[in-house]
Amino acid sequence: MNRGKIVMPISKLREHPYADVLCYPKFTLEELERRIFELKNLGITAIEFAGEKSISTVRVLGKGYVGVVVIAHAKRGKVALKIRRTDAGRKGMQHEAEMLKKANTLGIGPPLLGVTRNFLLMKFIEGKLLPEWLNSLKGDKKIVKTRISFVLRTLLIQCWQMDKAGLDHGELSHAPKHIIVDIEDIPYIVDFETASVNRRPSNLTSLCQYLFISSSVTEKIFKNLGKVDRGVVIKALRDYKKCFSKENFEKVLWACRLGDKKGLDKVT
Ligand SMILES: Nc1ncnc2c1ncn2[C@@H]1O[C@H](COP(=O)(O)OP(=O)(O)O)[C@@H](O)[C@H]1O
Ligand SMILES: [Mg+2]
């Protein structure tokens, strides 16, 4: 296994195992040629194989049910490229691009940079997934607490904004792979594949469930921020679900120990 990064220009992507990443999990020559053509149209000059996950013997940023995410080189620099899996349930990346674009209008998610049938191009978020980020925090307890509070409060505000805008992410109740915290402690919600504007949003409820009710990160959060009263959080969310008002949202924030005396003036 090569743990370093490998940069492959487009012209070399016909070689294995790189070609297998472009056409994962089922490789065919026709599909590879179609995809290389699309990459050229997107202005991609090379693909960088690096990251925590792997396919065959090469490293990638991430791997899910719909896509494989790698770093790509474009004129503007390094970008993130989501490659549609050959066995993905979706016919193309258009739906995800539309949902991400809608999130972007709210200042949420990695900015969308381009889309074709098999690829989605977006800003590369250099950072760690939320559980890893939480585990990486060391040093002064007060600083750690402030950093966690800032990131979680920002995330809850993002969920409220999406709820109000009618955009449901759809996968925030098991969020471990869908929140990246960048090197400046800015959290990004990723993967709008299952997002929809046609159902009642439950972003905040889902995320609070994940963060404060029951998951592998709950204990870690309680250890740093103090334990929340689950009953109070559930009650606040129940009221919030009826109306996504600022007052109801602030009650959720306070229940999660993320309230702020200054309130939400800058947000609304
Ligand atoms: N813009 C990005 N920058 C950096 N890493 C990303 C980016 N988007 C996704 N990833 C990584 O790739 C993984 C898979 O992406 P995701 O969109 O969830 O694919 P899938 O739809 O297949 O689940 C994520 O969990 C994350 O680790
Ligand atoms: Mg995913």
Image (cartoon, rainbow, N blue to C red):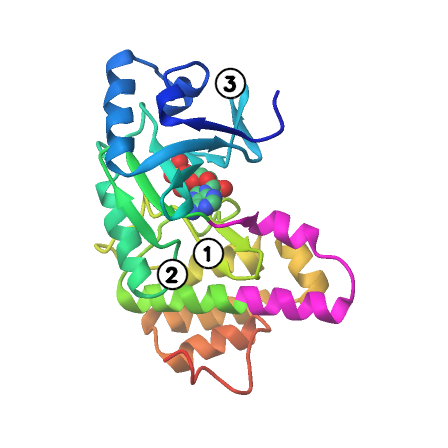
Q: Which residue is drawn at the image coordinates 36% and 47% (left, top)?
A: 122
Are there few (<14), some (14-19), or many (20+) residues within 10 Å of tag 2? Answer: many
Left or right: where 54 falls relative to 265 = right
Are there few (<14), some (14-19), or many (20+) residues within 10 Å of tag 1? Answer: many
Q: Which residue is drawn at the image coordinates 29% and 64% (left, top)?
A: 105
Tag 3's secondary structure?
loop
Q: Nearer the viewer, residue 40 or 59?
A: 40
Disc sitting over residue 56 in the figure: 3
Ligand 1 within 8 angstroms of badge 1 C-beta: yes
Q: Nearer the viewer, residue 203 or 123?
A: 123
Q: Earlier in the sequence, mark 2 or mark 3?
A: 3
Given contact means CB atoms under 8 Å apart, are the residues at marks 3 and 1 in contact? no
Given contact means CB atoms under 8 Å apart, are the residues at marks 2 and 3 in contact? no
Q: Which residue is drawn at the image coordinates 31% and 49% (left, top)?
A: 113
Given contact means CB atoms under 8 Å apart, are the residues at marks 1 and 2 in contact? yes
Left or right: where 230 falls relative to 66 = right
The picture quadrant for ligand 1 comes to top left
Q: Dot 2 corresponds to which residue?
A: 108
| Residue 132 screen position, x and y as percent | 63, 47
Tag 1's secondary structure?
strand
Q: Amino acid at mark 3?
A: Ser
